Amino acid sequence: MDVNDLRSAVTVALFLLFLALVAYTWSRKRKAEYDEAAQLPFAGDNDAVESRGEKS
C-alpha cells in the first residue's frame, strides 16, 4: 500500500461523509426545525428568547 492508495481511501471516506451530511441536512425529519429557524428573524426579541428556553 503506497501513499496514493491512502489518499484514495481518504477521498472516498470524505465523500461518503459528505453524502451522509447532505442526507442528514435535507431529511424530512428536520423540516420543522428549519421552518422554526426561518421565522426567527421575524419574531420579536421576547419570542426568540422564549423559544430557546431562556427567561429574561
Image: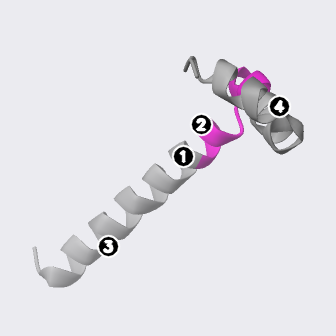
x then y, percent, for residue 29: 70, 21
Q: Earlier in the sequence, mark 2 or mark 4?
A: 2
Between circles 2 and 4, the one closer to the viewer is: 4
x then y, percent, for residue 2: 11, 80
Which structural element holds mark 1?
helix
- The residues bearing labels 3 and 4 have C-alpha atoms spaced at a distance of 38 Å
Q: Is 17 covered by the magenta stretch?
A: no
- The residues bearing labels 1 and 2 have C-alpha atoms spaced at a distance of 5 Å
Q: Is 30 covered by the magenta stretch?
A: yes
User: Mark 1 touching mark 3, by CB under 8 A?
Assistant: no
Give, as a three-letter code, the residue at label 1.
Leu
Which residue is disc 1 drawn over?
Answer: 21
Residue drawn at (85%, 34%) of the image: 43
Give, as a three-letter code, the residue at label 3.
Ser
Q: Earlier in the sequence, mark 1 or mark 4?
A: 1
The colouring scheme, among rainbow, by chain, secondary structure or one colour, is one colour
